Amino acid sequence: MKTQIFFFAIFALAACQPSRPTSVVPPAPRSEPAAQPQTTSPPTPTYAVVPLPENLVPGSGAFALSRSTRILVTEPASSEIMQVADYLAQRLHAATGGTFKPERTDAPEKGTIRFVSDPRFGNEGYHLIVTADSIDLRAKGGQGLFYAVQTLRQLMPLELETEGRAQGPSWSVPAVEIEDSPRFRYRGLHLDTARHFFPPAFIKRYVDEMAMYKFNTFHWHLTDDQGWRIEIKKYPKLTEVGGWRKETLVGHDREQPHKFDGVRHGGYYTQQDIKDIVQYAKDRFVTIIPEIEMPGHARAALAAYPELACTKGPFEVAAEWGIFEDIFCPTAKTFGFLEDVLTEVLKLFPSQYIHIGGDEVRKVRWKESQEAQRVIKREKLRNEEELQSYFVRRMTNFLGKKGRRVIGWDEILEGGLAPEATVMSWRGFEGGIEAAKQGHDVIMTPEDYVYLDHYQDNDTQAESLAIGGYTPLEKVYEFEPVPPSFSSEQAQHVAGAQGNVWTEYMTTPERVEYMVFPRLLALSEVLWSPRAARNWDRFAERLPHELERLRTLGVAHGRHFFKVKPKIEANAEGRCVVGLHTNTPESIHYTLDGSEPTPRSPLYQNAIVLDRTTTVRAVAAKDGQPLSPPIAATCHVSLASGKPTRYGSAFSEKYASERERTLTNGLKGSTNFGDGQWLGFAGQDLDATLDLGKSMPIRKVSVGFLRDAGVWIMLPGTVEFMLADDGKNFRSVAILKNDVEERDPKPLVKDFSAKLDNQTARYVRVRAKNYGKLPAWHPGAGNPAWLFTDELIVE
Ligand code: TNX
């Protein structure tokens, strides 16, 4: 019975081909929304394995697993292999209550799960063969077998992930043959435990979560301005003092003035905790790379030992985020201290790599410090950048002598770097490109693709506070760690990539999981699966099943994948064409009257054509249950819709996805400046001229602007509307002044509109004066402001 249900589940997933009726094309819209492709080919079974294996051949039949299935390990069975077999046994035992004790054997037997050591594979590759008779897992040693187990786990019924609740009597695993190995050798996930402390039990859970998707490296960010989290016996104040901050910033750090919660925050990992976690990770083939930040991001250490700074202090453990000027001073005392610290760190972490930070180092204190300047002289350095190089080199040499290698953030390249150091490229790809050219190994962690602290939804108001940005699942999936310009030799230097999880705005384990999942699954495929096999649609077919697994395991995760994606377009005929899409073939329900959509609202079938400004609300549903939060999108229809606009000044290519069509495409920018709808002008005025095609009566003109002072976007000082019939001789019809509070930190969209009397014109021109230089109260004072504009409406 269960067998059937499971097969049904597999086939139901397999049927995840787009199957909604194709949109009926509305009367000649200039560009109708992309119709759903129609498929005629029969569905093929999907094996919901993530990351996608290198090679998967479906078989026929299934292996029936029961509480009495035996696990055999073929001799010679190393202790590592026995351990992996045990790991599987324990999972099955926990789910079903069966015994599953692995047995050593010389002869394979029918009806069993068999672990076989096979020297043909690299350390991480494996072969998994499931037939009706047996399950064979083959690999060189423990690591490959561990990955075979993870794949096997994904082929088993989800029930087997539930503790003690799998009913049985048997569970089926579909027949399949998988040969698999990873594309990249470094597959990393990071966690910042300094900005917020997370208990050891969560660190273990995090390791389990990454191992499930075949990640092999955990980059553990242990020290920063806001907390020192690793016990160092020789310097107890690091954790006694540096492990605690008085309070924590409330809200976003761009919001001025800063407010604090008044609640002491902190904690640290004892050396025993760390040994325990390192062993736990090792058992899951995850190497932990500890990061001890230097010379910047060191305020917590300086609070404990102010004598390591260039000035006297005292210092406090930071309670807000950002980059601080107080950093380690490059003195003999500091180097002695750091070597002592690292000596203890090396005893705890056997990893070949040790991360020494190196990012965001302000050099002011070094410029002002006699001691720092003396080092510059003594070492014949040219400037403070070279002093940082010297700093990094000293630590690299120290670690090199102990048989370890250094990793640092891409800033460590500035001023020269020892060849054996590995560079973690976070400010885009450039640092990584430069480093690989110089012959360094590189780990790509470009913030635009793999900073998992960025928003995963562009409706930022519906999300809990995050640092900013917009990195949806699709974007992570698109990420390509090897720059296209690389030769094959340079490509060899790209060891892999990593997702970074900075926790300024993540205060709980649940929040961390929510931000990491499911984006980590997209990254796992980037890192593990062959480049050529990467395909969003195929990923989207497998993802819902994995999300079910996460739900079963109680792992918090975003559900944005299921959100309805509207494609809205106001055309030049004065109509709005709305196409609604989802990643899955589930039904979409919508309303046009402003009411909340439910699974009982009308079913979306064809593109919706509207002849006036309307808000479309929609939700995806399955079995009568909503799958995602509802979306709302308003299409603005006016005389300006779809009409061409010319620009007298250049807009930034970075923001508006539809370039010059942006102002008249029917969609208005939201309070998220990165939503793709805003036309942004850096330090420049707006001068746009709309051509209505022929002279017509005009009653009202309106245009929107964004204020988001924290990111330097300010409202215009004045907005002027002008009209003309010939496109040359414009008459001014309205000049509007901004009357909105400029210091308010909340993003705001403001429309400037003017009612007109008895006006007729073919051309409408809008001129808006850029705010100019940022004022004295602004952190960017003196720099030019941005002007962001969207949707020009003419009635
Ligand atoms: C930059 S990435 C930092 C971190 C912040 C992060 C926030 C890097 C090397 N430095 O200190 O937490 O941005 O996204």
Image (cartoon, helix red, strand yellow):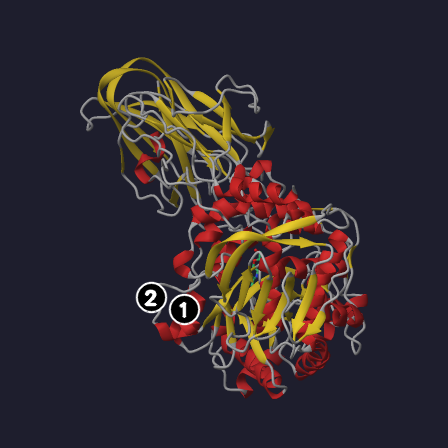
Residue ID for mark 1? 433
Residue 629 horizontal/vertical position (percent)? 58, 33
Residue at the extreme top: 758
Residue 702 horizontal/vertical position (percent)? 39, 24
| Quadrant position of residue 435 | bottom left
Left or right, 473 with respect to 337, comes to left
The residue lying toward the viewer, choosing from 445 and 654, is 445
The residue lying toward the viewer, choosing from 425 and 166, is 166
* Front label number (1 vs 2): 2
Residue 261 horizontal/vertical position (percent)? 75, 46
Three-letter code, disc 2: Ser
Callout 1 touching callout 2 (CB < 8 Å) = yes
State the separation of the CA atoms marked 1 and 2. 9 Å
Residue ID for mark 2? 485
Name the quarter where the N terminus is drawn.
top right
The structure residue drawn at horizontal position 36% and vertical position 27%, both measured from the top left corner, is 23
